[in-house]
Amino acid sequence: PTDNHFDQVMAAATPLDVMATAPSSLELLAQAQRAVRDEVGSLLAAVAALSEEKAALQLALDAAADRQRRAESDRDGARATGQALQARVVSATEEAASLRSKLSQREGALSVLRSEAALEREERQRAEAEREEAELRRGS
């Protein structure tokens, strides 16, 4: 069948023939809605995983900050070992900066996933509204 064949079939189709194809269109819409729902579920799971990772990174950042404060206190109390303690401070500061950077990246990714999830929900709601409208039109 060519496009020309399709045009011929459609030209010969009655309104009842066209209406008979509506359930398959609604089924396709329902399948699309299920796919969107599945994708939203996957996105929400990813958001939850990133939230857990963010919490773990925040704990690690707090621990690094505590180590940095202890190292600075040790340095003040023991000037004789200043160079060794300074190395610990530098290391803890670098670790804290690295963790802050990772935390910032995770927050950015989390924000993107939340936005995508919101868009998916809106799309699903729009598709549901279109399906309901199609059902109402078919019923009248």
Image (spheres, rainbow, N blue to C red):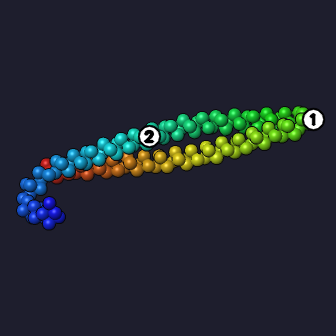
Q: Secondary structure at mark 2?
A: helix
From the viewer's perspective, is residue 137 above or below residue 90? below
Pointer 1: residues within 10 angstroms few (<14), some, or many (20+)?
A: few
Q: Secondary structure at mark 1?
A: helix
Q: Say which mark, if any, is on residue 139.
A: none
Image x and y of residue 49, in percent: 50, 37
Q: Is residue 6 left or right of residue 68?
A: left
Q: Nearer the viewer, mark 2 or mark 1?
A: 1
Image x and y of residue 60, in percent: 65, 35
Contact? badges 2 and 1 (CB < 8 Å): no
Residue for point 85% across, 37% down: 84
Asked which quadrant contains residue 3, the reply is: bottom left
Whole-angstrom CA distance, mark 2 to mark 1, is: 54 Å
Q: Is residue 82 left or right of residue 118?
A: right
Residue situated furthest bottom in the rendering: 4
Image x and y of residue 119, in percent: 40, 50
Identify which residue, 135 or 29, lies in the foreground.
Answer: 29
Report the residue marked by disc 2: 44
Q: Is residue 4 left or right of residue 122?
A: left
Asked which quadrant contains residue 5, the reply is: bottom left
Looking at the picture, which amino acid does disc 2 mark?
Leu
Quadrant containing the N terminus is bottom left
From the viewer's perspective, is residue 30 above or below residue 85? below
Pointer 2: residues within 10 angstroms few (<14), some, or many (20+)?
A: some
Residue for point 84% across, 37% down: 85
Label whose residue precedes the other's in the sequence (2 or 1): 2
Image x and y of residue 27, in percent: 21, 46
Residue for point 6% across, 59% down: 14
Residue for point 91% across, 36% down: 79
Q: Say which mark, if any, is on residue 80.
A: 1
Residue situated furthest right in the rendering: 80
Identify which residue, 57 or 139, lies in the foreground.
Answer: 57
